[in-house]
Amino acid sequence: MELKINQQFKTFDAETFSVQALLDLEIPNKQNGIAVAVNNTIIPKLKWNSHFIQETDEIIIISATQGG
């Protein structure tokens, strides 16, 4: 499966997986302070396990940072 994540194309072996599974692959050590949008729609953290990604989806992963 080829996905567009943060404006970059990435290829994965799986045919389908959840938002949580994607985050476990992409950022395994950071799960707090993250926002995920699929096709310009924010996916609430409570739905990360149940929202499945399709090959044509565009995903944006935003990580909160601190500083001023």
Image (cartoon, grey):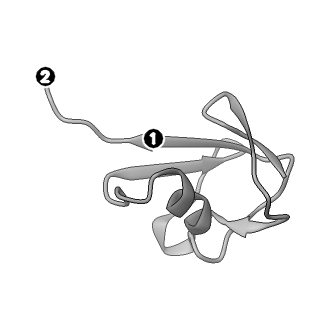
Q: Residues within 10 Å of mark 1 (few under 14, many from 20)?
A: few
For the point 43% across and 59% down, the residue is 28
**Residue 55 picture location, percent across and down:** 85, 51
Kind of residue at disc 1 = Ile
Q: Is residue 45 left or right of residue 12?
A: left
For the point 75% across and 53% down, the residue is 12
For the point 60% across and 67% down, the residue is 21
**Residue 51 picture location, percent across and down:** 68, 69
**Which residue in the protein does label 1 denote?**
62
Q: Quadrant of residue 20?
A: bottom right
**Which residue in the protein does label 2 denote?**
68
Placement of the C terminus among the 4 image quadrants: top left
Q: Residues within 10 Å of mark 2 (few under 14, many from 20)?
A: few
Q: Quadrant of residue 17?
A: bottom right
**Residue 42 picture location, percent across and down:** 57, 52
Q: How many marks?
A: 2
Q: Nearer the viewer, residue 65 or 10?
A: 10
Q: Quadrant of residue 18?
A: bottom right
